[in-house]
Structures are given as structure tokens and as C-alpha cells.
Image (cartoon, grey):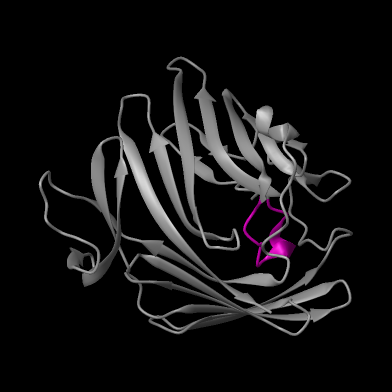
Amino acid sequence: MKFLFRLILPIVSLLSITESCTVQDHLKPAIDPYINCLLSQKKDMDLTPLEAGSNLTVGDDFPNGNGTAKIVDIINIDGQNYAISSSGENIDTYQYDSNKKIITHTHSNRFIRGAETYSYEYAPNKLTEKFVHEGWPSETRTYSYDLNEYGLIPKMGVTYNDEGYTINDHGSKITILNGNAIKSEYLSATSFAEFDLTKSNIPNPLPFFGKTDHNLIQKNTIDYGGYYPYKLIVEYRYQFDNEGKVTRLITISRYYDGHKNIAARSYKYGCN
């Protein structure tokens, strides 16, 4: 995944990426489990630490920010048990045409009234996007884009390589290797990412916004320089179905002071 995510911190906003050269770089790639599949749903999952000795188990009701939800799993991270429930803050769904091009993307947030729907129409080297917010306040907008030679929506301040991967984004210098963004440099911050080259990345439903990494990211290490240097390490853990498709992602961000942030997300696919 291009996994170009922004870590917004008090001093610097870093465009982060995904991958670094490891022994995994020499492993033989497996058969792509997504060859006949498209991403149909991406959903945040609530993840809550359990008290020691808790009797809660899978299937029990558990309170969350929107009432209660069923516990779908209990996981252990660094000796602490966490309950994963079936609800979450954000949910995105995707629909495609017969040519496997996305035609509708719907985004919902449990704290925002009404869904946001993005509809797409295609013409040679052109893309039309219609945005509708169904809640309050209601809103409708339409955008037309001329696509560049890579089939992407051009962006000011962004430079691509010969394969269409972003190598510079508003001053953030990005190094691409094996279709993965392995390094990002921005001001005094440098990010190094490691990938499992035997596993294909989750399909990208919105390819015209930019290429994502070819393989699954395993770890991202961000070094912040300057007067107060520190390090952030982000670890990625996956759950797979029988065909090898990612069904769940656990992201663990470990900060220099020992604090950590954990997030969970589920994935569904449509296959033929």
C-alpha cells in the first residue's frame, strides 16, 4: 500500500510510506489471492483493553461509543487482552462496474449525520466525480479531472517516476523499490518501511488518486531529528482468510515514551 499516511505532530507533518530492504526482499512471491477480487468494504473496529480476570468472551455484548456491540475476538498485545467489537467509527463501501472500475464509494462516520457518497463516471483520459452529503447540512458538488499519462489525477507539487509511483510529494522525497515506498524524507524526519514481498497488498479501490504499495507493510520506523530527536515505530499485524486475503489489520504505534496506540480494521471483498 502506498500507505502514505500523515503523522500530524506538534512540529512536523510527515508523509509516511512503506518498506525497507530486508531478507524478505529475496523471498519468492506467492500467487496473488486478489486476482479475481475487489475490495468491497473497509471498516474500523472498536478495540478496548480488558481488565485482568475479565470473564467477557467472544459473542458477549460490549459497550462502545454507539451503545453496545458484539465482541468478535479477543487478542493479546504485550500481555494485555483487548476486546474487538463489531462496530467502529468509520466504514467505507465500494461498488464497481463490469470493467472492475469503481462507480460508487460511500463513507460513513458514526459521529456524523448522514453518509458521504462519491460517484464516478469515465471518459477517455477524463474522470468525473460527484460528491453528495446526505446528512445535515446536505451538499452536492461535481468535479471533472483530466488524467495524466499514468491514469492519475494530477496534483500540484507531486512528481512521479516512470511507473507512476509518487517520488516527491510537496517536499517529501520518497524512494520506491519493488513497487513499494521504502523510505520517505521530509525536513528532519526520515521514515523506513519493511514489507513482506511474498504477500500482495490489499486491492486499491481508488487507483486514480495514486498508486499504493505492491506488498503488505510489516513495520514502519520514523526517526525525527532536530533539537528533540525521537522515534516512532508502527507495527502491522494481519489476519487472513483461507485464500490469503487480508480480513483484519491491527496497527500498533509505539512512541518514544512507552505510550502506544492500537487500531483495528476489517476488510471484505467481492470475488468472481
How far across and down, in percent of the image, does residue 183 sit? Answer: 66, 32
Q: Is residue 79 left or right of residue 181?
A: left
- Apparent side of residue 61 relative to residue 241 in the rendered image (left or right): left
Picture residue at 32% right of the left edge, 69% below the top: 111
For this rendering, which residue is in front, 137 or 272?
Answer: 272
Q: Quadrant of residue 206?
A: bottom right
Measured as percent of width and height from the top left, residue 132 is found at 54, 82
| Range covered by the magenta-colored residues | 200-212
In the depicted structure, whether residue 42 falls above or below residue 157 = below
Q: How many marks?
A: 0
- Does residue 215 appear left or right of residue 5 in this picture? right
Residue 171 in sight in this render = no
In this view of the protein, which residue sits in the foreground, 35 or 132?
35
Residue 263 shown left or right of residue 22 in the figure = left
Q: Main secondary structure of the magenta part?
A: loop
> Residue 13's x, y, as percent?
52, 38
- At x 50%, y 17%, the residue is 226
Relative to 212, say whether 93 is above or below.
Answer: below
Task: Please tell me in which quadrant of the rendered image residue 207 appears.
Answer: bottom right
The image quarter containing residue 140 is bottom right
Place of residue 91 in the rendered image (x, y in percent of width and height, measured from the top left): 44, 70
Is residue 206 one of those drawn in magenta? Answer: yes
Q: Per the image, is 254 magenta?
A: no
Q: Residue at x 34, y 42 (%)?
A: 261
Residue located at (81% from left, 46% from top)? 160
